[in-house]
Image (cartoon, rainbow, N blue to C red):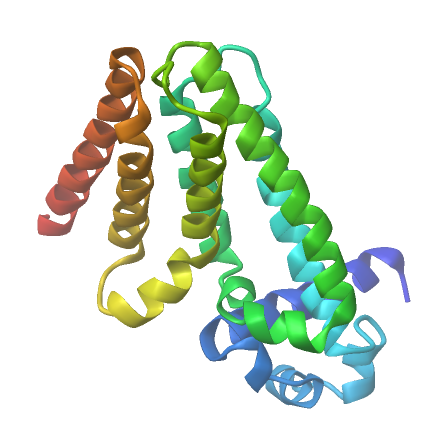
């Protein structure tokens, strides 16, 4: 099989698997169901993805790659709280694109030891990136000078908690809401978690970010009314 056709077939299988996983949940779609949906023999699927775990790994790698640039940016000089919160918008959008992963997260950790090991490494990297960013806000005067290292640790935990679990809660509490509204809701929650710890300088950045969320909401309402 030519390399181009091989890659296009693999991508076609991956794209459809992601669609089905997002719609029905990873745990409810197997290789056989995927093959039937694609009108392929099981062997045509397992040639590219021998086990479902390989599809899960591919989804995980693509989500990690999509978020990599954002988390790397947390280490840049002159990072503002506005930049930090705006970056989370991209993280949330990426998570929604690959939403089957966070929505089946606990089952995946239980069922796939390799997924668990990779996640623990990623989790530590993300924790370090978040902590570095929040520490930089104290150094740049965007957090109050009275904020302690313990409180910074709490902020890192809360930001990580919201980022990891917002989709699960939204699937229960906001099933009828549009995804744009849902993302804005959790971004605002994230901003308000940080805001009490800010200086006057940092508060301006948070207020500016919340204003952009309101502006986006107004634009969506206007476009929906047309």
| Residue 170 lies in quadrant | bottom left
Q: Nearer the viewer, residue 8 or 111?
A: 111
Q: Is residue 22 above or below residue 191?
A: below
| Residue at x 62%, y 34% (from the top left corner) | 128
The total of numbered circles placed on residues is 0
| Residue 26 lies in quadrant | bottom right
Q: Nearer the viewer, residue 212 or 110?
A: 110
Q: Residue furthest left?
A: 225
In the rendered structure, the answer to whether residue 224 lies left or right of residue 156 reads left
Q: Nearer the viewer, residue 22 or 151?
A: 151
Q: Quadrant of the N terminus?
A: bottom right
From the top left corner, tell me how far across and down residue 14 is, in percent: 67, 66
In the rendered structure, the answer to whether residue 163 lies left or right of residue 129 reads left
Can you see residue 137?
Answer: yes
Q: Residue furthest right?
A: 1
Q: Is residue 135 above or below residue 150?
A: above
From the top left corner, tell me how far across and down residue 28 is, in percent: 56, 85
| Residue at x 77%, y 87% (from the top left corner) | 42
| Residue 195 lies in quadrant | top left
| Residue at x 72%, y 64% (from the top left corner) | 115
Q: Is residue 79 above or below residue 34?
A: above
From the top left corner, tell me how far across and down residue 205 is, in percent: 30, 19
From the top left corner, tell me how far across and down residue 99 is, in percent: 49, 62
| Residue at x 69%, y 78% (from the top left corner) | 111
Can you see residue 8?
Answer: no
């Amino acid at each position: 099989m030519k390399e181009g056709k091989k890659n296009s077939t693999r991508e076609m299988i991956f794209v459809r698997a992601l669609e089905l996983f997002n719609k029905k949940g990873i745990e409810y779609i197997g290789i056989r169901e995927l093959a039937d949906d694609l009108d392929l023999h099981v062997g045509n699927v397992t040639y590219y993805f021998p086990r479902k775990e390989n599809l899960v790994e591919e989804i995980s790698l693509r989500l990690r790659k999509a978020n990599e640039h954002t988390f790397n940016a947390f280490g840049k000089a002159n990072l503002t709280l506005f930049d930090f919160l705006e970056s989370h918008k991209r993280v949330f959008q990426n998570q929604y694109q690959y939403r089957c992963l966070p929505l089946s997260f606990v089952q995946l950790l239980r069922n796939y030891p390799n997924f668990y090991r990779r996640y623990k490494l990623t989790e530590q990297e993300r924790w370090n990136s978040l902590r570095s960013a929040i520490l930089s806000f104290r150094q740049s005067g965007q957090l109050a000078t009275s904020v302690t290292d313990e409180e910074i640790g709490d902020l890192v935990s809360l930001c990580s908690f919201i980022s990891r679990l917002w989709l699960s809660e939204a699937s229960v509490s906001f099933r009828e809401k549009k995804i744009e509204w849902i993302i804005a809701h959790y971004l605002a929650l994230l901003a308000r978690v940080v805001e009490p710890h800010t200086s006057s300088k940092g508060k301006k950045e948070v207020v500016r970010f919340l204003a952009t969320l309101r502006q986006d909401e107004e634009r969506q309402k206007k476009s929906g009314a047309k």
